Amino acid sequence: MHSPIGQGGLFLIQFIAGLVIFALMLRFLMRATRVDWHNPIVHFIAKVTNPLCAPANKLLPHPNRWDWPAIVTALIIQALTVVLIGYLAGKNFGVGVIAISSITEVLNQLLDMMFWLIIIQVILSWVSQGTNPNTAIFDQLTQPILAPFQRLIPPMGGLDLSPIVAILAIKLTQIVVVGSIAQIGTQLALSA
């Protein structure tokens, strides 16, 4: 896999899988945060991800706000990506490595998405005037994430510091929790 063509193929596989998983994680977050389903961005994500989630929807109906079929579909796509990358690299990963790699990658994507949504929302709150359905979606996505932090740290002098604390919590979760799971996967891979 050291040839430029091999590296290009590996990049394309990771890029396409990353885009698909991004869309699935966005779908999960939009449902979990109860975003207004009349928004055109929401319609687009639903149209793109509905065919992917259809098989999992039959097995795991989601009567409440947690869209588990989107998570399961993302995990399956990530697992297939790991298997394909292993095949192209001439490596045979065990089931444990594939599972842990898939879980950590999907968790990292979800946490990264939450991080960037908060950053974008903070910037939009500084520059955006009035209501716009395309910017309102960021408020709808981040408000449920920020709410617990806003209860802990109320606004001081009109300045809301909860995004800073939320970002710290997200990054610490990535480093400590997801990093620990990834370390287990690395140890499994090395022992195989």
Image (cartoon, rainbow, N blue to C red):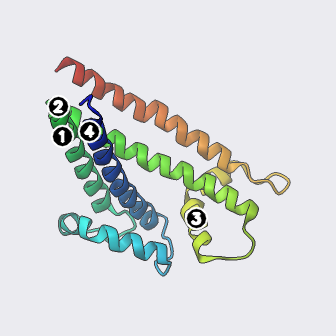
Q: Is residue 191 above or below residue 20?
A: above
Q: Residue at x 33, y 57 (%)?
A: 20
Q: Is residue 60 left or right of residue 172?
A: left
Mark 3 to mark 2 CA distance (whole Å): 38 Å
Check the image and name the residue furthest to the right.
157
Q: CA distance from mark 2 to mark 4?
A: 23 Å
Looking at the rendered structure, which numbered label has been put on residue 5?
4
Closer mark to the observer between disc 4 and disc 1: 4
Q: On the rendered image, what quadrant is the N terminus found in?
A: top left
Hey, what amino acid is under mark 3? Phe
Q: Give the residue type at disc 2.
A: Phe
**Residue 53: x, y in percent?**
25, 65
Q: Which sits earlier in the primary sequence, circle 2 or circle 1?
A: 1
Left or right: where 135 falls relative to 78: right
- At mark 4, the secondary structure is helix
- The residue singled out by tag 2 in the image is 93
For the residues labelled 4 and 1, the Cα–Cα distance comes to: 19 Å
Name the image quarter holding the C terminus: top left
Residue drawn at (44%, 61%) of the image: 29
Q: Are marks 2 and 1 in contact (CB under 8 Å)?
A: yes
Q: Are marks 3 and 2 in contact (CB under 8 Å)?
A: no
The residues tagged by marks 4 and 3 sit, at their Cα atoms, a distance apart of 39 Å
Q: On the image, numbered disc 3 is attached to which residue?
A: 138
Q: Secondary structure at mark 2?
A: loop
Disc 2 to disc 1, C-alpha distance: 7 Å
